[in-house]
Image (cartoon, helix red, strand yellow):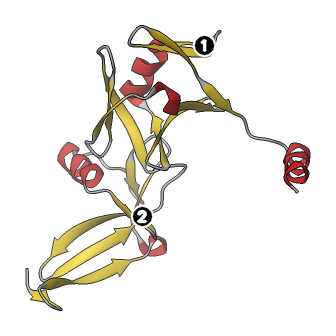
Amino acid sequence: MKELNNGKPRVVVIPEEEAVFWLDEQGDWRNEHGPFEHPRIIEYFHSSIKHDFSGYYVEQVNGDVLERVYFPYKDTALFVFKVISGAIPVLVLNTGRRIELDPAALFMDDEDIYVRLDGVKAKFVKHGLKAIAKMIDFEKMTITVNGRQHSLSTKRKKGFRSFLKDLFKKI
């Protein structure tokens, strides 16, 4: 790659509105023709996800240019695809990152299960959802990790009336 600006490559930024691909609510990459089908391309896109103050993007080198494409997504750009069982389960994200499960970081929003990670959320989908659901007692809204039972927080969408009531409590 040709380097410019004190050893740094020329960067071309493509805004979200001009991206020709997106990430759907189940963690699947799509374009105007439908879902991506080639496993290596899907894995490449997932492993390339990065985040900055402008949002989530993927990068690729194209000749002497580093292309940074901010992409649209629904709900979140991070997903838990797999759970590796053990005394403390390990979550495998769509990016390939592995993290130990912190039960206090789990929550439900309507019917979806999420985990908080570094100020953002990752949604459980596919095999990850099946695995975590087996660990949750939905009647008690608890999860057992390393022999200890933890409460699972829930977040329900509030109506406008509840929103106003909460807002006026803060004032």
**Quadrant placement of the N terminus:** bottom left
Q: Mark 2 points at which residue?
A: 71
The image shows residue 118, relative to residue 10, as above or below, that is above
> Quick one: which residue is furthest to the left in this view?
1
Q: In which quarter of the image is residue 10?
A: bottom left
> Quick one: which residue is furthest to the front in this view?
171
The image shows residue 23, relative to residue 61, as above or below, that is above
> Quick one: which residue is furthest to the bottom in this view?
5
Residue 76 in the image, given as x and y percentages of width and height: 49, 49
- Of the residues shown, which amino acid type is indicated by label 2? Phe
- What residue is at 27 percent from the left and 54 percent from the top? 45
Residue 107 in the image, given as x and y percentages of width and height: 57, 31
Q: Nearer the viewer, residue 39 or 139?
A: 139
Q: Is residue 13 left or right of residue 133?
A: left
Instruction: Give me the disc on residue 138.
Output: 1
Q: Can residue 99 be seen in this view?
A: yes
- What residue is at 21 percent from the left and 68 percent from the top? 60
First-in-chain label (1 vs 2): 2
Q: Which of 59 and 19 is in front in this view?
A: 59
**Quadrant placement of the C terminus:** bottom right
Could you say whether the residue bearing mark 1 is in a helix, strand or loop?
loop
- What residue is at 12 percent from the left and 80 percent from the top? 63
Q: Can residue 34 be seen in this view?
A: no
State how many labels appear.
2
Q: Are marks 1 and 2 in contact (CB under 8 Å)?
A: no
- What residue is at 18 percent from the left and 81 percent from the top? 65
